[in-house]
Image: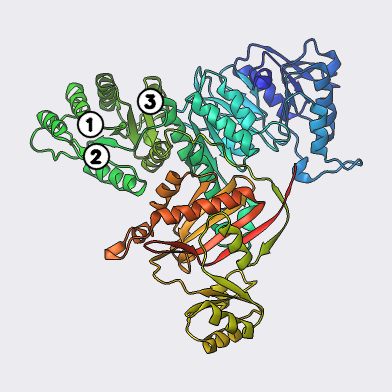
Amino acid sequence: MQVLDRLLRPKSVVVIGGGTWCENVVRECRKSGFLGDLIVVHPKRSEVGGCMAVQSIDDLPFVPDAVFVGVNRHMTVNIVRELSAIGAGGAVCFASGFREASQELEDGHSLQEELVLAAGDMPILGPNCYGFINALDGAMLWPDQHGAASVSRGVAIISQSSNIALNLTMQARGLPIAYFLTVGNQAQIGLSDIGEALLHDDRVTAIGFHIEGIDDLRRFEQFARKARALRKPLVALKVGKSEQAKTATVSHTASLAGGVAGARALFRRLGIAQVDSLPVLLETLKLVHVTGYLPDARLASMSCSGGEASLIADMAFERGVNFPELDDRQKANLKTVLGPKVALANPLDYHTYIWGDVEAMSRAFTAMMQGDLSLGIVVLDFPRADRCSQDEWVKVLASIEITVEATGKPMAVLSTLPETLPEDVAATLVAKGVVPLCGMEEAMSAIAAVSSVPEELPSEMIHVPKTVGKSMTISEGEAKIALQKHGVRIPVSVQANSANDAVSVAERVGFPVALKGLGIAHKTEAGAVSLNLMSGEEVSEAASSMPADRFLVEEMVTGGCAELLVGVVRDPAHGLVLSLAAGGVLTELLQDSVSMVLPASRSEVRDELGKLKISSVLAGYRGRPQCDLDAIIDAVMAVQSYAMSAAVEEVEINPLLCGRDFAIAVDALIKCGEAIDE
């Protein structure tokens, strides 16, 4: 966003306040070599941290581009109002005690709302945030020490935690970081706006996030699509679970789709590489900074140790990373270099016969990289510089450079331990276009993350559901009828208002029948389901044993080969999340599920069904009949159609009974309400 240019890339900085935090901002700007104007506002001091101070905003000799507001929360509101009035470029609001403290003013507006009103059109970061580090231009609106170094090009990291951002500045992995930004409460400017502003800086190669929650789903999608158009990779570390996951009510779907699963589905749809730890976030950003996303996870690994070859193979296998077998050309060229004593395989243990011979090592590495590969890895752990010589290890780096030049394929140096790849070596490798990967587990996780990003994003925008007001759970019979109108096939079923009524209804439907107690969410656990009832006496007996007064009598569907769960949850952070899972009593037992953000295409549903463990049963396991996959997909698309047309909180079919020529909703639950216009 152009509106953030002055704030993030300032030519003038003002610090308001005189405490230690403000003195640190002055110190860090000067230490970084900030070339713009720098001045402090303090009512009683003539200098702060060795920088000239004026008494008020009115005394400033220029209108500032960026302001660090380091005073208490009540003064912050007034100062932001003054800055907005003079046309300042933007402000960092350091103080806490706003939304997170639920501080109320006499007029009933929260202090945070008052702050946003005071800012008007002037952008503000925070409140309750550390601000930002611009290591490209030396602008450090940052109230603490940090480990960032000046760079001319690099990645950006946006964090919702100031302390996490501070810790990340101390990384020693050779990752060039252009920006660190913290967003705090996101009272006015959120992740999406900041991310989009960074995309417009040609010096930023990729953006990483430490995310606790998405600010605005539609804005976030627009930002992600713009990043893809500009070929700037996004990497996200999502922490925490949404309230949806914590307040799961009527269905299994909520626990499957809420929070973490919803975030994964959203990031996959938007082409964002997702990681699960801070070290992997850094390694992934390093990888995409040099190579961009990888088209797949086909690797070649080269090391002078059989132990390292085995270790990397095991770690790769666990993460879906693969090492293709060598073809005849690779084997012939490797044999010429390595001789008959070396077993030729991928991962390759090239032994130490050629150690220290730059020409021979480069020939071996080049031979390995002749295959259909996305990345070549040379496992290399440097000895301690304070106790050992590194001369022979540097020769391996020279061989890698020759290989990159000869093959044009990306290469990486991988240390088995983070501490065995010195920071200066890592930085040199990055500058030469070679990826320095620190730690084998982190590296394999990073490769898995960047190689699983889809090549193209769906053309259809994410469905953003309306806010739902007071909601209610409708009966199973009503739920089935609602879904049937959208194309879901259901059994013949009739409601009965008593046990005696159930008997007469069963006789009309025809035996065998299934009997279910109405008004109960998890019927199996509550003893409210009886199957294969063959007579009126059995129906009466079953009804009298159930904790219900009303019943659903259904035709007994036979010939089923598998049971699936098909459900949709309205996730406040991620939209409508569709989940497919092993159904019936196996849902919790197998924990076999996949999730998608709506709308999903038929081909996506088909692909995701294939990822389930139960997919082998659907395909006809050990000679059993194959289920009608098209009928299953028809049912899933019908559930999607209903969910996108109604004000739903949850929709679930469990089980969807699947046979060789049918897919029938045996049980259904819907929680819905009235849409609220916002």
Gap between marks 1 and 2, in whole Å? 8 Å
Q: Horizontal and vertical percent for residue 350? A: 18, 35
The answer for how far apart the CA atoms under marks 2 and 3 are is 29 Å
- Along the line of sight, which residue is nearer the eye, 251 or 668? 668
The quadrant of the picture occupied by the C terminus is top right
Q: Is residue 168 above or below residue 320?
A: above
**Foreground residue, 619 or 455?**
619
Q: Which amino acid lies under the numbered mark 3 shown in the image of this protein?
A: Val
Q: Say whether disc 2 or disc 3 marks the residue closer to the N-terminus.
A: 2
Residue lying at 37% horizontally and 46% vertically, measured from the top left: 319
Q: Provide the secondary structure element on which disc 1 rests.
A: loop
Q: Amino acid at mark 1?
A: Gly
Residue that extends furthest to the front in the rendered view of this protein = 508
Q: Is residue 259 visible?
A: no
Image coords of residue 21 (percent x, y): 71, 29
Residue contact between numbered discs 2 and 3, judged by CB atoms under 8 Å: no
Q: Which residue is under mark 2?
A: 324
The residue positioned farthest toward the right in the image shown: 106
Above or below residue 380? Residue 263 is below
What is the secondary structure assignment of the residue under circle 3?
helix
Q: Amino acid at mark 2?
A: Pro
Dot 2: within a 10 Å radius of its alpha carbon, few (fewer than 14), some, or many (20 or more) residues? some
Residue drawn 61% across the image and 56% down it: 650
Indicate which disc, 1 or 2, sits on the residue closer to the N terminus.
2
User: Circle 2 sits in a helix, a strand or a loop, which is it?
Assistant: loop
Q: Residue furthest bottom?
A: 537
Q: Which residue is mark 3?
A: 425
Query: Is any part of residue 582 visible from this angle?
Result: yes
| Depth check, front residue: 257 or 102 | 257
Q: Which residue is mark 1?
A: 371
Q: Give percent across and percent down for residue 602.
A: 45, 46
